[in-house]
Image (cartoon, rainbow, N blue to C red):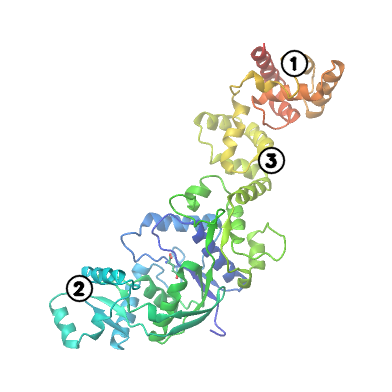
Amino acid sequence: MENEEIRVRFAPSPTGKFHIGSARTALFNYLFAKKMGGKFILRIEDTDKERSSEEYTQDIINSLLWLGIGWDEGPQVGGEYGPYFQTQRLGSYKKFADKLLEDKKAYKCFCTAEELEAERTAQHAAKQAPKYSGKCRNLTPEQVAENEKAGKPFAIRFITQEKKVDFDDLIKGHISYDAGLIGDFTIVRSDGMPLFTFAVVVDDYEMKISHVLRGEEHLPNAAKHILIAEAMQIMPPQFGHMPLILNTDKTKMSKRKDPVSVTDDYRAKGYLPDALVNFIALLGWNNTDDQEIYSMKELIQEFQIERVGKSPSIFDREKLLWMNGLYIRHLTVGELASQAQNFITDKELEDKIMERPDFYLQAVALVQDRLKLLSEVQEMIKFFFFPQEYDAEVLIAKKSDKTRTALALKLAEEELAKLTKFSHDETESTLRAAAQVNELQAGEILWSVRAALSGSSASPGVFELLEVFGKDESLKRIATARTKLA
Ligand code: GLU
């Protein structure tokens, strides 16, 4: 396809929630297009009417937009080669199917579902691979006319040449496929709906698609596409099939047991789109250097189809979580606070945040370092607004005991009460001095005060907490802790 514009498409079927594997396919197409100064097209393959739905189409669109993978042509934006929904392109499929019939490269098949099933069962019993017998290929024009007159439904089958189909896959390298194994396959169902294998060829041709990058599961279909393209006397696009994505235990990712929905398992759980994009970009990418953190802009710069490896990629959730934490730390406090607000589900907490937005910002700033997911914010900041129930044991530092902790808290309360300025530095020097004078370890007093303020053994630092809470609230919580311990 020399001198032609690079045009790639992402062609999902809206038959389920948008899958993380599809997100990778979309992203690689997008990166390839942007890198090469080409166009990225979104085409919705909705010919499987029973399984397709508007809701799933919307989920594809929302997920892509959330990930920042915008399309140059497709639903909502339109384009020169539309429509971009296959169900709106039936006229095109009919035109090409009729031409194949006319050219005797396809035929009408009147076999019923029962007949075909019986054929497959017999082949199975004889330990043969399933393959259509080609029965209707030899019907005379009279027989065809008779069947049609009798109102028998028919599918359109493509005549598969028994030959080797050779092509160079951009990722998998040279592929040689024995078409003799395929048999004549259906390209249009008896209800007039094209099969995906055929519709894709028509659309890719009409939409001037130069490259098809998609998952490895489609590799066998490429041979069919190429045969159809040959019969239609058109140039097929160049293919590139991306490796499978596996779980860390090398099993295949499954819709039922693994978190694969971009919306439900990632967006709703508090992942950041930039982190997810960064992570999925590295799935299948042979890194030549150690760099792991890439912005979309850098990904576009660095993208090379040659960098995509042949072997399966491992979806390491721990790594994704780590990466998400890293991206969270790179947000400004304001960005984090506003994004995390979408994950506050506790009504009372929500009201408190509305009442004291500045305090919310301060609380968020103090937990930012420990966050891996936006959804963790709620649990982590609750104690700022509502003193939490806790066990008195929490107040006692390692290697300390109840008596020493009681003393530590008493001293803390007395000394902090004297302060007129309640800053980080003031409270620090006060508590450290109190520990020293009374022969306590600094750690004992700092631990117990921190636990008194947060009600937990894991929380931000004590001086930061004291400053954010202020004198009155801090003293109140220390007093409560003392009562608890007594
Ligand atoms: N509609 C197909 C799918 O969702 C993709 C077809 C293609 O990329 O060629 O699996």
Element marked by disc 1: helix
Disc sitting over residue 153 in the figure: 2
* Image location (x, y in percent) of residue 178: 43, 80
**Residue at the far top in the pictured view:** 486
Q: Which mark is residue 413?
A: 1
Residue 81 in view (yes/no)? no
Q: Which mark is residue 292?
A: none
| Between discs 3 and 2, the one toward the N terminus | 2
Picture coordinates of residue 222 (x, y %)? Answer: 45, 75
> How far is mark 2 from mark 1, CA to CA?
88 Å
Q: As displayed, is residue 79 above or below residue 333?
A: below
Where 184 falls versus 404 (above or below)? below
Q: Quadrant of ligand 1?
A: bottom left
- In the image, taking residue 288 as reference, residue 433 lies left or right, namely right
Residue shown at the point (19%, 87%) measured from the top left: 141
Look at the numbered disc 1 and say if its residue's Cβ is closer than 8 Å to ligand 1: no
Say which residue label 3 marks. Answer: 369
Q: Are marks 1 and 3 in contact (CB under 8 Å)?
A: no
Callout 2: helix, strand or loop?
A: loop
Q: Residue 244: horizontal and vertical position, in percent?
A: 52, 63
- Disc 3 element: helix
Look at label 3 and name its amino acid: Asp
> Which of the two discs, 3 and 2, sits closer to the camera?
2
Q: Position of residue 426 (x, y in %)?
A: 82, 25
Mark 2 or 1, nearer chain start: 2
| Quadrant location of the C terminus in the rendered image | top right
